[in-house]
């Protein structure tokens, strides 16, 4: 019985050892990774990128897993001077993948080292590219892009420095990004990394430059506002001049019509007077009397005072208006000094 127990215990140990050895020799390759087998720290064989169940030597060989998917790199924001001596803060990002797993594993080992190497190389190439170009090349995305412009500003001055006119560019930010990628990709290939794309995520002005930028923007907006004000004042002056011309034309036309009507009325009145004189001798006296009344009405108001001499025509009219009483002696002449 003791021998049977020992034999059973030995078989259990052997089975457990065999199972542990079998499990140590099996590994699974996922679809999102690639595997490098190392033996005593050195890579052996070719990288394995096909997913499935694989075998290795237990306790001797080690499975090292690397990513097959696209990886991202997000650089830190750095202050860089442009060629025209303007400091800007540039924030870049990139996409990359492991193209040569063996070289990558030997040179870098893990993703953290790769991120550090990307920071050094892409950051350095970004500084070099920005320093070789003016600020407008970094701000404008593409030299083929035509910026929008207010149609009302076409009537103003044209040329560099005028309202709404941007300086010409030779490359644009897209070309600068392409140059950064080309220069950095050649260096990253030595580490088994394929650089897929490099982009500028954000460009901010240095705080010391912001005041100048804002003042320039305010100045340009002020010029545009002044242009609109000038156009409005010119249009207002044109409308006011047209109004004055129309008003003078209306007044002259009305005055001409008034004078024409008055002339026609005077002509008709003269014709009526002439016919009246020819019809009756008393008409002349009646006309003289009516004209005298009109004269009195014109020169004498309710509270007016009039001083006349005895030989004036108006005094004679008043004297004749008083007249001699019928069938009686001649009336005494009134006191000449004052008539109310």
Image (tube, rainbow, N blue to C red):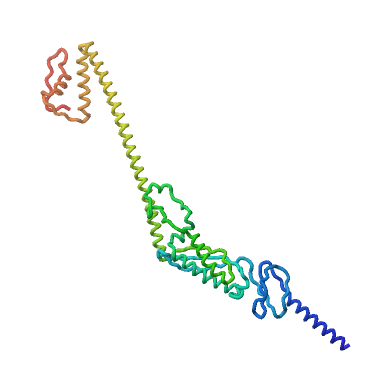
- Residue 340 in percent (x, y) is at 17, 27
With 270 as the anchor, is 161 left or right in this view?
right
In this rendering, the answer to whether 130 lies above or below 157 is below
Looking at the rendering, in which quadrant would you find the N terminus? bottom right
Q: Residue furthest bottom?
A: 2
In this rendering, the answer to whether 106 lies above or below 94 is below
- Residue 178 in percent (x, y) is at 51, 62
Q: Is residue 201 visible?
A: no
Residue positioned 29% across, 26% down in the render: 258
Residue positioned 21% across, 31% down in the render: 303
Q: Residue furthest top?
A: 279
- Residue 70 in percent (x, y) is at 61, 65
With 321 as the anchor, is 145 left or right in this view?
right
Residue positioned 82% across, 85% down in the render: 10
- Residue 69 in percent (x, y) is at 63, 66
Q: Nearer the viewer, residue 303 or 266?
A: 266
With 68 as the anchor, is 160 left or right in this view?
left
């Amino acid at each position: 019985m003791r021998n049977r127990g020992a034999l059973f215990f030995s078989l259990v140990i052997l089975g457990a050892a065999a199972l542990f050895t079998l499990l140590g020799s099996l590994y699974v390759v996922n679809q999102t990774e690639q595997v490098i087998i190392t033996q005593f720290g050195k890579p052996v064989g070719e990288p394995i990128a096909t997913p499935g169940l694989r075998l290795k030597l237990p306790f001797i060989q080690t499975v090292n897993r690397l990513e097959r998917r696209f990886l991202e790199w997000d650089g830190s924001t750095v202050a860089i001077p442009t060629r025209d001596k303007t400091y800007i803060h540039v924030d870049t990002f990139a996409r990359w993948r492991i193209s040569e797993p063996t070289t990558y594993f030997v040179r870098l080992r893990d993703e953290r080292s790769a991120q550090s190497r990307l920071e050094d190389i892409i950051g350095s190439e970004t500084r070099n590219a920005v320093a070789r170009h003016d600020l407008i090349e970094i701000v404008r995305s593409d030299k083929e892009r035509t910026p929008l412009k207010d149609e009302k500003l076409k009537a103003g001055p044209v040329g560099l420095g005028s309202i709404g006119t941007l300086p010409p560019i030779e490359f644009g930010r897209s070309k600068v990004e392409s140059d950064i990628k080309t220069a950095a990709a050649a260096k990253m290939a030595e580490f088994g990394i394929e650089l897929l794309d490099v982009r500028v995520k954000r460009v901010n002005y240095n705080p010391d430059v912001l005041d100048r930028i804002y003042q320039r923007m305010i100045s340009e907006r002020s010029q545009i506002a002044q242009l609109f004000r000038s156009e409005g004042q010119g249009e207002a002056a044109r409308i006011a001049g047209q109004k004055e011309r129309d008003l003078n034309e209306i007044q002259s036309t009305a005055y001409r019509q008034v004078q024409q009507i008055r002339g026609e009325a005077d002509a008709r009145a003269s014709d009526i007077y002439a016919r009246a004189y020819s019809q009756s001798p008393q008409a002349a006296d009646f006309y003289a009397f009516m004209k005298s009344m009109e004269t009195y009405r014109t020169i004498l108001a309710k509270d007016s005072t009039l001083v006349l001499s005895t030989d004036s025509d108006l005094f004679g009219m008043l004297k004749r208006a008083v007249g001699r009483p019928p069938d009686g002696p001649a009336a005494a002449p009134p006191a000449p000094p004052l008539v109310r």
